[in-house]
Amino acid sequence: MAQNSSSADGFAQSPATYQTENTVLSILKEFLESKVAVIGLVLLGFAIFLALCGPLISPQNPYDLSEITIWDNKLPPLSAATDGNLTYYLGTDDQGRDLLSSIIYGIRTSIGVALTSTLIAIMIGCIAGLFAAYFGGRIDSLIMRAVDLQLSFPTILVALLLLAIFGKGVDKVLIALIVVQWAFFARIVRGTALVEKNKEYIEAARCLGLPEKRIIFRHLLPNSLPQIIVVSSIRVASAIRIEATLSFLGVGMPVTKPSLGLLVSNGQDYMLSGQYWISFFPGIALLLLIISINLVGDRLRDILNPRLKR
Amino acid sequence: MLVFFIRRLMQSVVVVALMSIIVFCGIFMIGNPIDTLISPEATQLEYEETVRDLGLDKPLHQQYFIFLRNVLRGDFGKSFVFNESAIKVILTRLPATLELATSALIMAVILGVPLGLYAGIYPQKLASKTIMNFSVLGFSLPSFWVGLMLIFVFAVKLGWLPASGRGTTTDLFGISVSFLTIDGLRHIFLPALNLGLMQIAMTIRLVKADTLENMQLDYVKYAKVKGLHPLRIVCIHVLKNILIPLITVLGMQYGLLIAFAVVTETIFAWPGMGKLIIDSINILDRPVIVAYLMITVFMFITINFIVDILYSVLDPRIRLK
């Protein structure tokens, strides 16, 4: 939802739109009409809260060796710690780490990586898309050729290809996610900007002799924002999924920065001996996270997309 | 048509060349291959000798052309692990991946079409709504986690199906396949279900929407008036009209299935290309990584090329663009 409020700021600064308070309020009001979307929003809010204040509320720091007890390993859910002052509500993993704490830290990593990469991808995609739409001609065909080429490969394959070359690491996962995502934004921004470009207010701005930079970023961009918001919510969910998949495969996040995907992969070896919880609960957390973002994103799409409006 | 064909072919060739540059630069610039090949105690003389033997003292563009020449000959160097030509290592695993991807598509049709038909014919029934909700879930579920859960439920708890490997294989035209034996079928069921999960969900949604639309059309009403058995109307007349768009969409998913096979093969220890690439990345078997990347990229460009050509045959408007 951080994106939503930032978009509101964008509207406020934009001279092209007015009645800012009114628009935000009506969007919010319309949003709350759908029960499923509200559930999604609450879940997402909770996940973001966990991501922000994770270290403060988690029962233990699973990556501080002094806090974990190795002989508490692979305990089933709801069992008590041997030193007695802790209950492992979701059980422990093979290192004796409390799974609940690991999941809270994992959500923090997953959301952090997905949000950062998507925000940078939005910036790059917006600039590329706006330039393509505004200048047209050779710049347009060059940028869109690159976009088409990239989107003809599945995202997971491109990401895997990049990480096969770079090796694993937080920065490398970020780069891979940015590279696989920018093209989606470039395409959607170009599309909406092409429509906006021929409208009268842009023509008016041109007649006023405003510099091109100002027309692009203060007029064209704010009016393409609703589309960007909708796509970005869905892309964040997919970034979380891609990152989790890569980490699960062992080519994504390093062991020192475990995301939800890595937690699931930790439990893979214990699945056959019936210790399901090590993989089960991180996966549930991942699933809820993805579903909540998708629910919120779907609702936003319904509200912001004028074509779907009654 | 011929002009379009040639232009599109040249585009593909350019893309392949571009990708080969990217892969070459990426692999050979970022990590220094000598460090992994030579022992740290080697003298300066030995070091220089190795560099010369590998051709690493030549300027970069010359190195690239040597690389390109070898690639065109199908020579990606020897795998460090298998001590065999890298391309051979990959090609021996290709049939397993293709078998898995094909089974996943078949699974999508076998499960997706009947469920979608049911949901489309009786959209108000509770069962239909459950089916549709599950199909939404199919898009959100992380496939690697579903794979683990399938193993836990069907292999560990119930013990119905094996959790890993290909089982007994038989030779079909010199390629070993699993689907001809009962044991092989038991082994392929879970991985195919896991890999095809998203495609199953997609098929359900597609078939449901199309059925809903087709049931309102005049030809169905006419068939009903004519007194045809409802089963005949659905299974022959409606199904025929649904299958064409479905096959087009599913065909385009084939590439995606090959890409996602990496995940499924890792979970179910399916001995295909996907598992090979992950293992190779983890032990830095560079020739195999390069060969895999080039082969997959080539495969995808070929698939895209064929799809584009087929589309332009079917829809002349595309050619004009």
Image (cartoon, coloured by chain):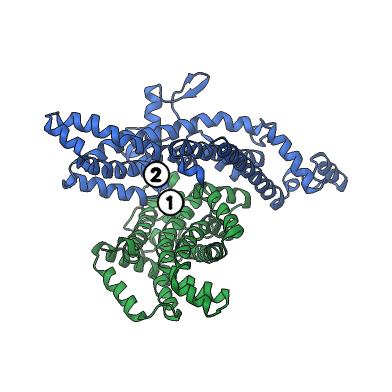
> How many angstroms separate mark 2 from mark 1 (CA)?
9 Å
Residue A301 position within the rendered picture, expressed as x and y whole percent measured from the top left: 35, 62
Kindly indicate whether the residue at mark 1 contacts the one at mark 2 (C-beta within 8 angstroms): yes
Q: Residue at x 49, y 55 (%)?
A: A243
Q: Is residue A251 left or right of residue B229?
A: right
Residue A97 position within the rendered picture, expressed as x and y whole percent measured from the top left: 44, 58
Which quadrant of the view contains residue B81? top right
Q: Chain A's shade in the image? A: green
Q: Residue at x 26, y 47 (%)?
A: B132
Q: Chain B's shade in the image? A: blue
Picture mark count: 2
Q: Is residue B5 above or below residue A116?
A: above
Residue tagged by mark 1?
Answer: A264
Q: Residue at x 28, y 47 (%)?
A: B134
Residue tagged by mark 2?
Answer: B148
Which quadrant of the view contains residue B155? top left
**Residue in front for this viewpoint, B183 or A90:** B183
